[in-house]
Image (cartoon, helix red, strand yellow):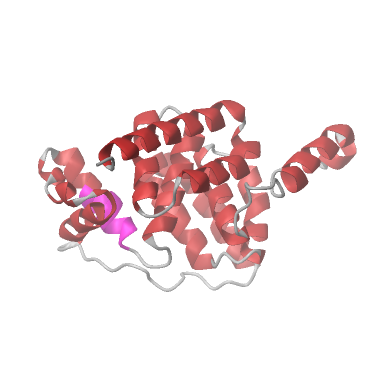
Amino acid sequence: MDFYKTDPEFMARLDHFMVEEVPQEPGQQLPEPTRHLAILATLLGCQGLEAFQDQLPQALEAGLTPVMVKELVYQAVDYLGWGRVKPFLTATNAILTARGVALPLPGQATTTLEDRLERGAETQAAIFGPHMLEAWKQNHINRWLAANCFGDYYTRTGLDLPQRELITFCLLSAQGGCDPQLTTHARANMLLGQDVAFLRKVISQCLPYIGYPRSLNAIACVEKAAEQWAQQHTP
């Protein structure tokens, strides 16, 4: 449906806010590839499939590679579940194919089924600290988290760790109801050099796609993470 014909007044205001005002807000701007990566992750998180389909070609034009987009979709499975990600993988494959991208893309895995647990725990430790090397021993869910989430996905090439933590932050903030995990991953972003100001910019640029309540909740989680960070780093 062409909303510009059926809802022209609404679309004029929406376009002004989403396409002009937010991206150009002084002090809240991001590099275009980073902004589009965050928006795509946010649309996955809030299950905005049609908007994701609209945004993906723009993201590719802005500098995201097919590999980066596929890595985003793959990683989302650990935070959203296959039931919610499958339609997005289908849509991504259709859009890439229509643009002449040959599938499958080159493999990005760096682990095997034999070393994924060890490598996953090492990746957790690289992000959160050395105490994570033994965290997988607590129970089978923590073992799965280390081996599957971090060993199968975070160790892949195509995206670096800061980009992967940015994606996780957006997936969590967009789906809502994940405040403890969102606070933890806000701190992880900070540990990787993506500070409070950066995370505020991310939230600002994604606000049109998830609305004010979840955006304000995300800001509160960032502030809580910043307080924890300050307490840990105060002499």
- Of the 4 image quadrants, the one containing the N terminus is top right
Which residue reaches farthest front? 235
What's the magenta bit mostly, secondary-structure-wise?
A: helix
Picture coordinates of residue 133, whole percent (x, y): 14, 51
Task: Depth check: give the residue in front, 187 or 176.
Answer: 187
Picture coordinates of residue 82, whole percent (x, y): 40, 44
Q: Is residue 154 magenta?
A: yes
Q: How many marks?
A: 0
| Figure quadrant of residue 231 | top left
Q: Is residue 5 above or below residue 88?
A: above
Task: Depth check: give the residue in front, 87 or 73.
Answer: 73
Magenta stretch, residue numbers? 146-155
Picture coordinates of residue 60, whole percent (x, y): 62, 64
Task: Depth check: give the residue in front, 91 or 3.
Answer: 3
State the residue at coordinates (62%, 44%): 205
- Of the 4 image quadrants, the one containing the C terminus is top left
Side of 4 where 100 appears, left or right: left
Q: Is residue 124 magenta?
A: no
State the residue at coordinates (86%, 41%): 4
Side of 108 where 56 appears, left or right: right
State the residue at coordinates (75%, 39%): 17
Q: Is residue 82 above or below residue 10?
A: below
State the residue at coordinates (62%, 72%): 100
